[in-house]
Amino acid sequence: MGAVFTSMTKPNADIISRQQLVEGCQQGIPICVIGGLTAENISELVDLPIALVAVVGDIMDLPVADIAQRCHEWQQALSKWKIPT
């Protein structure tokens, strides 16, 4: 579901509301979020049963030398999540 936040990759995408995201998570299917996600703003979604996170710009827009560090930051951010069963 997305875009969750304003996205540099797709600047004209409509942003879904938090209520739409909550309702999507109540459908009994694994939800993947996309759109404007960063290692910093992903914490705003930690209370939702999101199964997958699709990240493009927050990693791929970096110089190659910075990608490993950013992936580590994502790993730290996602370590706080409980994976839905």
Image (tube, rainbow, N blue to C red):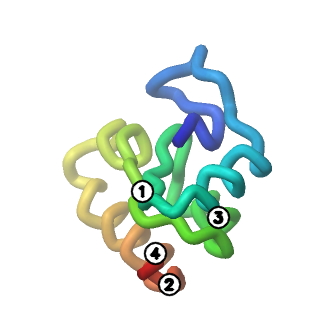
| Upstream in sequence: badge 1 or badge 3 | 3
Q: Residue most toward the front?
A: 28
| Residue situated in front as seen by the camera: 67 or 43 | 43
The spot of residue 82 in percent (x, y) is 50, 84
Foreground disc of the pair 2, 4: 2
Return the x and y of residue 29 as percentages of the image width and height.
Answer: 45, 59
Residue 66's tag is none
The residue at the point 59 percent across, 15 percent down is 12
Left or right of residue 79: residue 56 = left
* Residue depicted at 42% across the width and 81% down the height: 85
Badge 2 element = loop
Amino acid residing under circle 1: Val
Q: Secondary structure at mark 4?
A: helix
Q: Secondary structure at mark 3?
A: helix
Label 2 to label 4, Cα distance in Å? 9 Å
| Residue at image mark 1 | 53
State the residue position of label 2: 82
Give the residue at mark 3: 45
